[in-house]
Amino acid sequence: MITLFEKKQDCCGCTACKTICPVSAITMRADKEGFLYPEIDKALCIECGHCNSVCAFQNNGVKENNYQQQIYAMKIKDDKVRKESSSGGAFTAISDVILENDGSVYGAAHDVDLSTMHIRATDANARDRCRGSKYVQSDMRDNFRLIEEDLKAGKEVLFTGTPCQTAGLISYLTFAGCATGNLYTADLICHGVPSPAIFQEFLRYVEHKTKKTIKEYLHRPKDTFGWSHNEKIVYTNGTFDDTSKLALIWKTLFYSNTILRPACITCKYAGIQRYGDITLADFWGIEYSMPEFKDESGVSLIFINSKKGEVLFDQIKDKILYRKSSIENCRPYQQNLQGPSICHINRDDCWKLYHKHGFPAIAKKYGGYNKRTIIKEYIKLFLHKIHLLGIIKKILKRQ
Ligand SMILES: Cc1cc2nc3c(=O)[nH]c(=O)nc-3n(C[C@H](O)[C@H](O)[C@H](O)COP(=O)(O)OP(=O)(O)OC[C@H]3O[C@@H](n4cnc5c(N)ncnc54)[C@H](O)[C@@H]3O)c2cc1C
Ligand code: SF4
Ligand code: SF4
Ligand code: SF4
């Protein structure tokens, strides 16, 4: 009997096995943490074993590559685009090249309910929906099949996503015998992906608490705090929140590593060797190696990992500002170039708590949204209102 994986940690949910199955016996279903896993319908399965063979996450180590990797700091010249991008706008710059050649771009976008899924974009409007990081696992749906169709039709394709999605796609196309000469891939340095179901619960929780309806959710807005990581909730009544403890819950949960997919904790792609032709990231720590190139609108860190990546990079050079860098200048500030994220010691407790008492309980214990922090926030707000905060800060500074 065919088994797809022994432990949850062995499956990243890439969909390669589902897509390769010749009799459509595999369906992606959410487990009780809300992550999608492949499930075999035994009545349909003909035991061909393709699903096991195609699984890059379990079978393949990191791709061997003799290419002399190049590392750059870069910023797209278009300031508006850079401000809307999470880092320095590298994704828009490279995807423009593909769109100009009538190709298709695949990336993660928000659906109407703010869930995250991969989409196919053939124009700038659809591509812009993929702009900006979404710190939630993206649902791949049938995109591997669509990419195969595009490539077979002779189109250029740019796929952007997490390293495990990129590895899964390459493995699928190779196994399916699809020529990949026109495929360009950009993977991300990846901290890990939180549960999509918990994200939906978080949104409902915020709506319940505020009695407002959420219109938009931005994981990396730059308008208030510049290039950093704070999150922003935009409501249908025109108000927004990017400072309160409520608006900080998702970020706090994300970095607590309590609600990441189990596979992220054993991720084999958290290193310098990459699957993508290009790797996209934030150039954290740039102030130490290139202070003159840092600014508040964001700087991308990019790795050129192959000849194809170099070809793509050559075509964006007139639209970007860039400086050559090195692994020594970026690796110390990127935990996920050094290894996978470390599992929270109480991950199991977090999920037990969630299943017993629901989202409010984990928001309180692991998302930093508890009485102490809320009271502190109210006091701060009150002091600010009566102009006392500035005076207290001045007194403390003097001491
Ligand atoms: C879950 C996650 C974890 C990350 N961890 C790190 C990290 O530890 N260190 C670091 O330096 N950078 C990390 N990044 C990458 C960083 O946040 C930016 O996405 C990247 O630098 C691209 O920025 P940009 O300005 O070039 O383009 P943007 O316009 O911001 O484009 C965003 C790109 O990310 C893709 N994307 C967005 N959300 C998802 C998703 N949920 N799943 C798959 N692809 C997605 C889009 O398809 C697009 O290609 C992470 C991104 C994600 C989504
Ligand atoms: S191919 Fe992808 S979805 Fe299927 S078992 Fe492997 S990692 Fe999971
Ligand atoms: S063994 Fe073959 S038929 Fe059965 S689920 Fe896997 S790919 Fe499908
Ligand atoms: S951390 Fe690894 S397993 Fe998790 S989403 Fe990123 S690449 Fe995939």
Image (cartoon, helix red, strand yellow):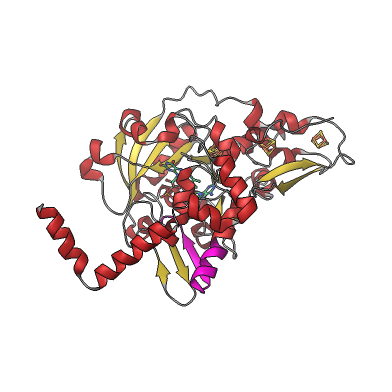
Tell which of 303 and 378 is nearer to you.
378
Image coordinates of residue 61 in percent, x first then y, are 58, 24
Q: Residue furthest bottom?
A: 237
Q: Quadrant of the N terminus?
A: top right
Q: Looking at the image, how many numbered discs can be counted on the residues?
A: 0
Against 266, residue 117 (above or below) is: below
Residue occupying the point 55% across, 26% down: 63
Tell which of 23 and 262 is nearer to you.
262
Q: Residue furthest right?
A: 43
Image coordinates of residue 232 in percent, x first then y, are 42, 62
Picture quadrant of residue 7: top right
Tell me if residue 333 is in the magenta stretch.
Answer: no
Picture quadrant of residue 20: top right
Left or right: residue 50 compared with residue 118: right
Which segment is the magenta one? 203-221
Image coordinates of residue 39 in percent, x first then y, are 77, 42
Q: Quadrant of ligand 2?
A: top right
Residue occupying the point 54% across, 34% down: 265
Left or right: residue 248 compared with residue 347: left
Residue occupying the point 31% across, 65% down: 379
Q: Residue furthest left?
A: 398
Residue 304 visible to the viewer: no
Image coordinates of residue 376 in percent, x first then y, are 34, 60
Residue 222 visible to the viewer: yes
